[in-house]
Image (cartoon, rainbow, N blue to C red):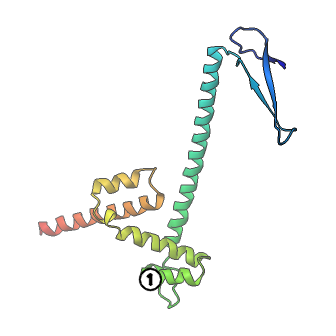
Amino acid sequence: MQLELSSPHFKSKAPSETFSVLVLTSLSNPEHKSFAIDKFPEMDPDAVEQFWIKKARRLRDEREDLHEELRSKASFVLETHSAYIQSAADFQGYDGRPLNTLSNAELLKIIDLSRGKGERAAVAKAVLNENYLLSSKKFREASLEDLLNMRDDKKVDPIRRTVAGRLYNEKILSLAGSSASSEL
């Protein structure tokens, strides 16, 4: 079969070109057809380059939109986490003690008993997450520079950034306290 294709980007600069196309019919399903072209159209190299430039820009814009969406979600997670941590003293465990004073086992029990749903469970999860990070050897043994870099690195999980900032402040206060006592 002869097929005439039109394009302003043919290398020949012709508005249209004719090509031989083979039509293949499936034996198992005669309604299913495939096409094979013997000689593929040659395109203007500048048009091909422009196509790839536009595609790369489109993909970059999509990637930037996705990153902005992720940054927005991370900001929401941090705000929510911070609100939960601030309200941890207001929420009580089943024995009347504030959630931020409970052990990890007690927090897990609250999460389990509430089937992981509700604001009490969300606050318990936030406190548990902070407890885990604060007890992490990686965080405890990190240098001041590492903690500062982690706190300021936008690529790091917002909760880890918050914990790194807290540990950084604790270490600075500890250093200031030890240097003040050594001067006495």
**Residue 171 falls left or right of residue 42:** left
Answer above or below: position of 2 versus 60: above
Q: Position of residue 154 (x, y in %)?
A: 45, 50
Q: Is the N terminus in the top left, top right, bottom left or bottom right quadrant?
A: top right
Disc 1, SS: helix
Type of the residue with mark 1: Ala
- Work out which quarter of the rendered image holds the C terminus and state it: bottom left
Rendered location of residue 100, percent (x, y): 45, 78
30 w.r.t. 53: above or below: below
Q: Nearer the viewer, residue 71 or 4?
A: 4
Question: Could one spot residue 52 in this view of the protein?
Answer: yes
Which percent across, then down, holds residue 162? 43, 61
Snapshot quadrant of residue 40: top right
Q: Is residue 87 visible?
A: no
| Residue occupied by mark 1 | 105
> Is residue 1 positioned above or below 139 on the image?
above
* Residue 147, quarter of picture: bottom left
- Report x, y in % for residue 62: 62, 39
Pointer 1: residues within 10 angstroms few (<14), some, or many (20+)? few
- Between 4 and 161, the one lying in front of the other is 4
Say how many tags the image has: 1
